[in-house]
């Protein structure tokens, strides 16, 4: 009995150390490590437009009391400046031009603060980005049935086994799924065309004017700078209002996607119009002459055009001159 371990040792040496290899062969193989499922990719938010980035910068710079969020589905920033008097003269809704902000340093910001210092509430809105206008809608590829069906599935596999009878021996009732007549809301929203740049600008003007009505001021005046002047005139031509008695244009120009000429809309308006243009560029002077001649032919009773000379090297003086001349025109007695 004592020789048994020695015999086993001799046999293992004779086999050339095969016992360890046999033991290794009998060890179970380690389970292959499967990589963890990667988390589902989250949808990236829409990139911020230039107008949204500029508006976000204004929100960080200006006090919260001056900021108002207006609009329905299309929310936008507006800047509110109350009149520095107990009896305000009215509300001036300021429409900046393309690429500008609600506190643009040229014309918009100085008028927003300067008119408020002389008895006018001011509400300056953020213009819409024309780059967001919809383009041609590309056709969506229809998903194939084979792609939607997982591999290995067959019609026989989808069949469910019959339900066993209950204790009374009756089979359970099978009800057919009810057909839903309601359309898919998500698909309908995706298929709906995006409003055009003109529609979004009109909606923003309507929201700003509706807010101005809640202030119960004596009058409402629209003031537009650059392309903002075109959209202000376009709004009044499409939506006449007895509450809006005056329109102020500062260096007006039509946008690239203008549907009608600015002169055509101005000739139809029954409000007082103050047309202010600066600079001595030939193009600006020619456009100013065209507007003046169009208003003469229309026989408008309350149209006045004012040319403001540039004060070389005095940017502050230029803006102060503009505020003073616009304020003087607003304080006149309008022709009704």
Image: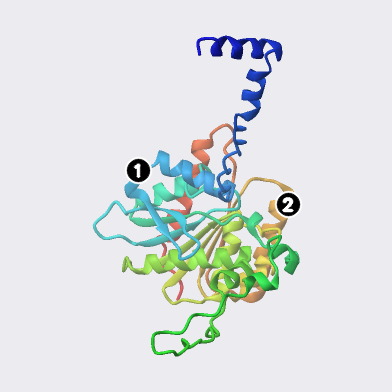
In this rendering, the answer to whether 188 lies above or below 54 is below
Residue 90 drawn at (x, y percent): 36, 63
Q: Disc 2 vs disc 1: Cβ atoms closer than 8 Å?
A: no
Which residue was labeled with disc 2? 283
Whether residue 84 is visible here, answered yes or no, is: yes
- Left or right, 305 with respect to 146, comes to left
Comparing labels 2 and 1, the label whose residue is closer to the camera: 1
Pick the front one: 286 or 64:
64
Indicate how the structure is coloured in the image. Answer: rainbow
- Left or right, 8 with respect to 119, comes to right
* Disc assigned to residue 201: none
Q: Quadrant of residue 218?
A: bottom left
In this rendering, the answer to whether 74 lies above or below 251 is below
* Residue ranking furthest to the front: 1
Pick the front one: 246 or 332:
246
Q: Quadrant of residue 210?
A: bottom left
Residue at (57% x, 40% y) in the render: 36
Q: Quarter of the image containing the C terminus?
A: bottom left
Q: Residues within 10 Å of mark 2 (few under 14, many from 20)?
A: few
Pick the front one: 194 or 241:
194
Residue 11 drawn at (x, y percent): 66, 14
Real-space CA distance between mark 2 and mark 1, rounded to the nearest whole angstrom? 39 Å
Residue 181 drawn at (x, y percent): 55, 85
Which residue was labeled with disc 1? 63
Pick the front one: 81 or 99:
99
Q: Residues within 10 Å of mark 1 (few under 14, many from 20)?
A: few
Residue at (67% x, 74% y) in the render: 297
In this rendering, the answer to whether 22 lies above or below 90 is above
The secondary element bearing badge 1 is classed as loop
The secondary element bearing badge 2 is classed as helix
């Amino acid at each position: 009995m004592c020789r048994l371990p020695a015999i086993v040792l001799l046999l293992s040496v004779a086999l050339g150390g095969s016992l360890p290899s046999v033991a290794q062969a009998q060890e179970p193989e380690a389970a292959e490590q499967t990589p963890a499922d990667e988390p589902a990719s989250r949808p990236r938010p829409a990139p911020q437009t230039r107008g949204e980035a500029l508006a976000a910068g204004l929100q960080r710079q200006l006090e919260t009391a001056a900021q108002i969020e207006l609009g329905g589905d299309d929310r936008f920033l507006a800047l509110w400046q109350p009149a520095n008097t107990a009896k305000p003269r009215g509300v001036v809704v300021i429409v900046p031009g393309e690429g500008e902000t609600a506190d643009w340093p040229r014309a918009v910001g100085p008028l927003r603060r300067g008119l408020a210092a002389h008895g006018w509430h001011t509400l300056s809105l953020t213009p819409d980005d024309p780059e967001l206008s919809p383009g041609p809608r590309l056709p969506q590829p229809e998903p194939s049935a084979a792609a939607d069906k997982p591999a290995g599935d067959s019609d026989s596999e989808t069949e469910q086994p019959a339900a066993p009878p209950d204790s009374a021996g009756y089979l359970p009732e099978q009800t057919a799924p009810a057909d839903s007549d309601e359309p898919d809301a998500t698909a309908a929203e995706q298929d709906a065309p995006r409003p055009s740049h003109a529609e979004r600008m009109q909606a923003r003007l309507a929201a700003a004017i509706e807010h101005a009505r809640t202030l119960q001021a004596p009058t409402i005046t629209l003031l537009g700078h650059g392309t903002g002047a075109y959209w202000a005139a376009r709004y009044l031509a499409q939506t006449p209002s007895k509450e809006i008695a005056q329109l102020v244009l500062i260096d007006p120009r039509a946008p690239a996607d203008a549907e009608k000429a600015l002169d055509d809309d101005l000739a139809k308006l029954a409000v007082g119009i103050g047309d202010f243009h600066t600079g001595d560029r030939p193009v600006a002077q020619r456009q100013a002459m065209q507007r003046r001649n169009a208003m003469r032919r229309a026989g408008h009773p309350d149209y006045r055009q004012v040319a403001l000379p540039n004060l070389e090297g005095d940017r502050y003086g230029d803006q102060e001159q503009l505020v003073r001349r616009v304020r003087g025109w607003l304080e006149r007695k309008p022709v009704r």
